[in-house]
Image (cartoon, grey):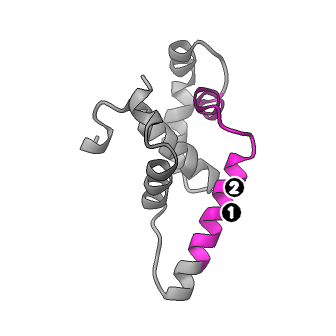
Amino acid sequence: MTSRYVGKPFLRLLECYVLDAIGKLEADQAEVLRRMEPKLGETYGMKGTWQQIVSVQMVLPESLPGKIRALWEGQLEMATTRGSVIAPNEFAAAFVDQNFPDAVAAMP
């Protein structure tokens, strides 16, 4: 675990939510998250997939994954035009930092 996540356990979940939305969540990470669903549900007092738990806790609109995916695709197109590359994890971290700067610190 990098220092980015120390004291911010929900931060990685948000980043995984973004990675899942853009189709870049690694299969092994997806499996770990799937296995964590019962514990996450217990922690947050609800049942559902890890994505649903994140969505409810952050009060995210159902349309957000599609919007994230569209933004990702646009960023990829711009990067390709410039001859550069965007790393999915960097995109996810930047998206979370830009869109949820205060929420992450407050999450258990």
Above or below for 70 versus 40: below
Badge 1: residue crowd in 10 Å (few <14, some 14–19, many ≥20): some
The amino acid type found where label 1 is placed reads Ala
Q: Residue furthest toward the right?
A: 63
* Residue under pointer 1: 70
Relative to 8, say whether 25 is above or below. below
Residue 67 circle label: 2
Q: Quadrant of the N terminus?
A: top left
Local SS, label 2 = helix
Asked where in the image residue 50 lies, by quadrant, the reply is: top right
Q: Is residue 102 magenta?
A: no
Q: Secondary structure at mark 1?
A: helix
User: Start and end of the magenta stretch?
Assistant: 49-77
Mark number displayed over residue 1: none
Marks 2/1: CA–CA distance = 5 Å
Left or right, 58 with respect to 13, comes to right
